Amino acid sequence: MADETIGAHITYFEEPDIIFMRLVGEVSREEGMALNQRHRTFGEGRHHVFFLIDLARLEKIDPEVRRVATETLRDVPLRGMALYSAPLKAKVIAKLIITALNMFKRDASTNPVIFTKTEDEARAWLAARRLEIQSAA
C-alpha cells in the first residue's frame, strides 16, 4: 500500500478492494487524468472495488476531469463509495459526478454512495457493504 502522490493529491490501492483517494485544493486537468488512469489500473482484473475518498480539502475539479471521472467510475467494477469529511462545496462537486454516473448505470443500486463525517464511519460502511456483497454471491 504505497501512496502515490499526484500533485497535492494521494491515491493508493488498499487490499483487498479499496481505492483510497484524498483530494486537496484544485484538481487540475493533468492531475485528474493521472488519477483516473491509476484508478482504472487499480480496478483491472478485480471482481469489485470500493472508493474511500477524503474530501476535507477539495476546492475544485476541472470540468473535463469530472467527465472522465464519470467514465472511469462506470468502467471499473465499482460496488460502493464512501466519501468523508466533505464540506458543502466538496459535496456538491462529488454529487455532480455521482449524478452523471447514475444516469449511465442501468442499476444505481449496485453502486450505493454514502457521505460520512469521519474516515472510521466510512470504513465501517464499506466493511458492511463488503459483507452484503459476499453474502449475495
Image (cartoon, rainbow, N blue to C red):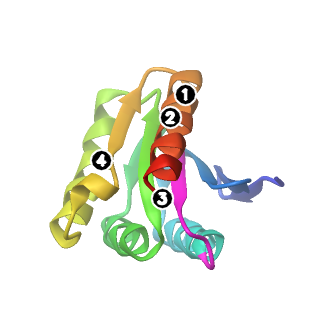
N-term-proximal mark, 3 vs 4: 4
Mark yes or no: residue 25 visible.
Answer: no
Identify the amino acid type marked 4.
Answer: Ile
Mark 1 or 3: the one toward you? 3
The residue lying toward the viewer, choosing from 3 and 18, is 18
The residue lying toward the viewer, choosing from 131 and 40, is 131
Crowd rating for badge 3 (residues with CA inside 10 Å; few <14, some 14–19, many 20+): few
Q: Which residue is mark 3?
A: 137
| Distance Cα–Cα, label 3 vs label 2 | 15 Å
Q: Which residue is mark 4?
A: 93
Q: Residue at x 56, y 75 (%)?
A: 40
| Distance Cα–Cα, label 2 vs label 4 | 26 Å
The residue lying toward the viewer, choosing from 70 and 17, is 17
Element type at mark 3: loop
Residues at circles 1 and 3 in contact by the CB criterion of under 8 Å: no
Element type at mark 2: helix
Residues at circles 1 and 2 in contact by the CB criterion of under 8 Å: yes
**Magenta part of the chain:** 44-54
Q: Residue at x 51, y 31 (%)?
A: 122
In the displayed structure, 56 sits above or below 2; it is: above
Identify the amino acid type marked 3.
Answer: Ala
N-term-proximal mark, 3 vs 2: 2
Identify the amino acid type marked 1.
Answer: Ala
Identify the amino acid type marked 2.
Answer: Ala
Q: Which residue is mark 1?
A: 124
Mark 1 or 4: the one toward you? 1
N-term-proximal mark, 2 vs 4: 4
Mark 3 or 2: the one toward you? 3
